[in-house]
Amino acid sequence: MPTLVDNIGRSTLTSLEYLGALTAQSWAAVRSLKSVSPFVGNKFRWKASIREMLDIGVDAFPMVALMAICAGFILAMQGAAELRRFGALHYVIDLVAVGFTRELGPLLTAIAVSGRSGSAFSAEIGTMRVTEEIDALRVMAFDPIEFVLAPKFIAALIVVPCLSILSNACGILAGGIFMFFSTHLSLGLYLRYVLNSIALRDVISGLIKSLAFAAIIVQVGCLEGFRVRGGPDAVGRSATAAVVKSTFLVTLADAVFTAIFYLTVR
Amino acid sequence: MAVISVRDLVVEYDGRRILDKLNLDIQAGETMVLLGGSGSGKSTLLRHILGLERPHSGTILVKGMDIARCSQLELKRVRRSIGVAFQSATLFNSYSLEDNVALPLREHTSLAPSIIELMVSMKLAVVGLREFGKLHPQELSGGMRKRAAVARAWALDPEILVFDEPSAGLDPIVAADLDELILVLKQACQMTVIVVTHELASAFRIGDRIAMLHKGAFLAVGTKEEIRNSTHPHIRQFLDRVPDKLEDTNPVESYFESYLQKEDVTR
């Protein structure tokens, strides 16, 4: 009967093996980025990348915008409820602006993209594995990483930061609407306060985070797909695992990045 | 000269031996049929010949290249000379038939689009699907999908053409049509053809030589006549379609009898 130590050892080895596979796949994906780049790469891959950009970015925009508007209202209302007691209602503007550019914009976008596209990547590649399409690619002398993963990777690296910026804008706008109705602060003046409260490094740190989140979502989603063994039930399980693991890793990465930014700009 | 050479091939999954010290030479220009029942290891052997899996031990030389140990670049070069029509056709559903066939031509050659269009049209015409080029795989019947898979496998005019269970799931007429197509292609292009099948009619119609697999080992490798006249008990059982357990003629009845005796439910 396996002991607790056996189980811990086995779990550790499984996690290390997973991280190793993720690193190896990420490295292969980085090396194949050239093949999907415009002008220098394969034009069919670039076309596939544009299709992926539409799927990951344009189609997700309404959902991301709605989530950001709701989160903007929530943050402003919760902040106002506490700050009003200290006569510091105007700090709601800082709270919403800094909170969204540094944190909530990239994180909300990553959660939305992970749920929408991470699971879709996993299901698509998993189905290709089950139906031997990945094997067909390999025997036709195509690299599945270059053919399937790289277009998704470059598309996510481009559109997820764009979605984050739009998410920031929607969240901040929601805060402005709240301030207009609660304090009659005009939108123009609100935006001026917003611009005063955020620094360029806040925006850049948010964008760096969203690049890392995009990489995590694509790599985890695709790895789960490539690891599918068996039938359609395994595809379903891989889609669930892709969302759970990528959300977990995104949150972990967010904590690490936030700690780094906090320690370096103190 | 052997275009594919398998030497002492051993394949194990989780300590279970699937292929046991296989040796096989496939000569250039011949049609080799890998024949065997379900679970005999013929598809596993094919996957190893295609370099999709690494063997436990032994070597597989394809055109003189050790397919399990060569570099990725060498593997790609070898694979460009092999066309494979998988059992489930494995056409890309998001592409039309034309795009499926054009894919290897667009990616692996520098031919002008008009030439590629012409070649795709010709390949589809040979497999009888010229009018269906704009359709997507999900809009076709099983037989048409298999023929489209043949057109795609043949797109680059490979030296070796591989068919995994070409007649599986097809009615006898469509299966016979596919056999004739394989024969026509073989005759026209002088390719080496490997066919994995458990269909006796197909095997004896298209094969020059037959390798009979059973439980991961070759029972016999020889010409059609040699296999047909074999006295090996399992080959005879396979060819004569004799079930495994003749003494247990009515397993359902015997199961219920033993159940009734055990449970004594009649009491």
Image: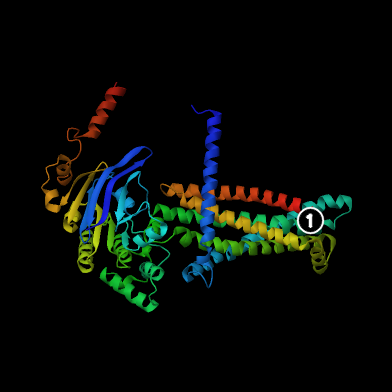
Q: Residue at x 48, y 49 (%)?
A: A236
Residue B117, given in percent of the width and then of the height, sits at: 36, 75
Q: Residue at x 77, y 54 (%)?
A: A265
Residue A228, given in percent of the width and then of the height, sits at: 45, 49
Q: Which of the pair A57/B76 is nearer the observer?
A: B76
Q: Residue at x 78, y 60 (%)?
A: A178
Residue occupied by mark 1: A95
Query: Is A104 positioned to the left or the right of B39 in the image?
Result: right
What kind of residue is marked 1?
Answer: Leu
Residue lying at the far bottom of the rendered structure: B114
Q: Quarter-wise, where is residue A163 in the image?
A: bottom right
* Quadrant that contains the N terminus of chain B: bottom left
Figure check: A248 above or below A167: above
Q: Residue at x 12, y 49 (%)?
A: B226
Q: Quarter-wise, where is residue A118 in the image?
A: bottom right
Query: Is B161 positioned to the left or the right of A69 in the image?
Result: left
Residue B141 visible from this viewpoint: no
